[in-house]
Image (cartoon, grey):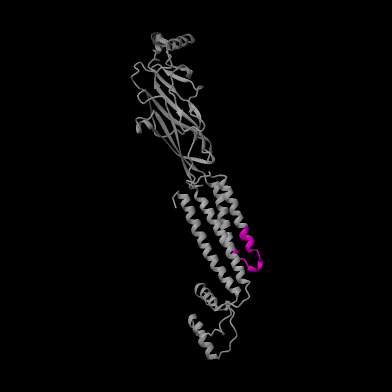
Amino acid sequence: MDHKLVLVYILFLRLEYIRCANITQVETLYTNLFQKYNRKLFPLINHNDTVNVSCTVGIVSMNNFDELSGEIELTMLFYMQWVDERLTWTPSESGGKSTLLVPPEDVWRPQLYLLQSFDRIQDISNESMMVRLSSSGLVIWNPGSVLKIVCSVDVTYFPFDTQTCDVTVSGWAYTADEVMYYTTSSTVFQDYFSSNSQWTLESASVINYTDIIPSFPPSINIALKLKRRSDFFVVYIIFPMVFLGSINNLVFVMPASSGERTSVAITTYLSFIVFMQMINDTVPESSAPMAYIYYYILFLLVYSSAILFLCIVSLRIQDKEDPVPSAVKKVVFLLRFLCFKRKKKSIVMPERKFSNVSIQAEVKNNNFNENMENYKEADSPTVTWKIVGKTFDKYCFTALFITFLVMTTQTFTKLYTNQGF
């Protein structure tokens, strides 16, 4: 019973502090606040002071990025706060109401314009986003907007390129003495960010331009670093080009009698033209800088042209019927025996009669140069144009494959690490 009396006594004493704001009190509060309020004037009593606007930037999504036109579409949020000295009240006189939601057109709001707008100077204000007033004069406004900006695209290292896009929002009409924007965080708020299928957001930083250039209008710069998702281009373009380049060199292994060498070389050459067109549809047409992958495709075209030319030369060599000159014979001996370490049976030896003693002496002699000096010109091994053509094919295959391997490895290593050539 005593506990109940104590509870009733406490409720009776504190009843005067328990208030509930009704509609009449809120309407009266709203009327009193905006009866003589002029939203066109700065929210200051002393207009020699500066309006300090804090701003936190958030990114929601990256909707589209057209590298050909340089247009990028972003959905961003701006969390802004400032103090309006004319909008203060005592909560106890208004039924304990300490905050109030009002339409944005009823209060003074800072003007923010997007400087890198794609088609026009875009106002990022969102008229549908309500403004929250606090009894202390604190104003909280969180507008959001879909920004279409122009971003300078650098596709030098396509498809492993990284793009840096600047988003500058500025109160162009103000001076630094009238309105000052300052950031509460050097990073962009990403809690609501949804990933993009073509690009990843590596980093996003915010700086205050006025701290760097005092004479510049109050502005905030957002630097976004985007990295392309390269998996699709690696599977769709790079791997097929490398495989075609490898297959192209195999025409020197094909028998010359098959008659398909030149057709395979021409087909591969035309395939590289198709891949160039595919890349051209994706990469912006720019000469400064130009994507390094174009240089690689140019190398493949020259490489394929050289293979086609050398195939024709090889076919011409193997179709000859004239006697092989002695100088060509010596070169073939040198290339086949000393470099490839071929057995001597790969060249047709003429029939000669030797005594058992002389045959044993020649078998024991392993120095090929001395054997060549012992043979007379008339008794030298028979070298046909077909053997000359095969030797030519082997050296062309080796030289071109090494060139292709070195160029491919160097090119894609530089592209992947974003290093210059």
**Does 176 appear in magenta?**
no
Whether residue 1 is visible to the viewer of this picture, yes or no, is: no
Position of residue 326 measured from the top left corner of the image (x, y, whole percent): 54, 79
Residue range highlighted in magenta: 251-266
Q: Residue furthest right?
A: 258
Position of residue 168 measured from the top left corner of the image (x, y, whole percent): 44, 32
Which residue shows up at 42% across the image and 27% down it? 172
Count the numbered circles shown: 0
Position of residue 350 measured from the top left corner of the image (x, y, whole percent): 59, 83
Position of residue 340 measured from the top left corner of the image (x, y, whole percent): 52, 72
In front here: 162 or 193?
162
Whether residue 418 is visible to the viewer of this picture, yes or no, is: yes
Q: Is residue 297 above or below residue 130?
A: below
In front here: 77 or 256?
256
In front here: 173 or 189?
173
Which residue shows up at 65% across the image and 63% down it? 260
Direction from residue 365 to residue 44 in the image, left or right: left
- How would you classify the magenta stretch by its main secondary structure? helix
Direction from residue 384 to residue 60 in the image, left or right: left
**Quadrant of image for the N terminus:** top left
**Does 258 appear in magenta?**
yes
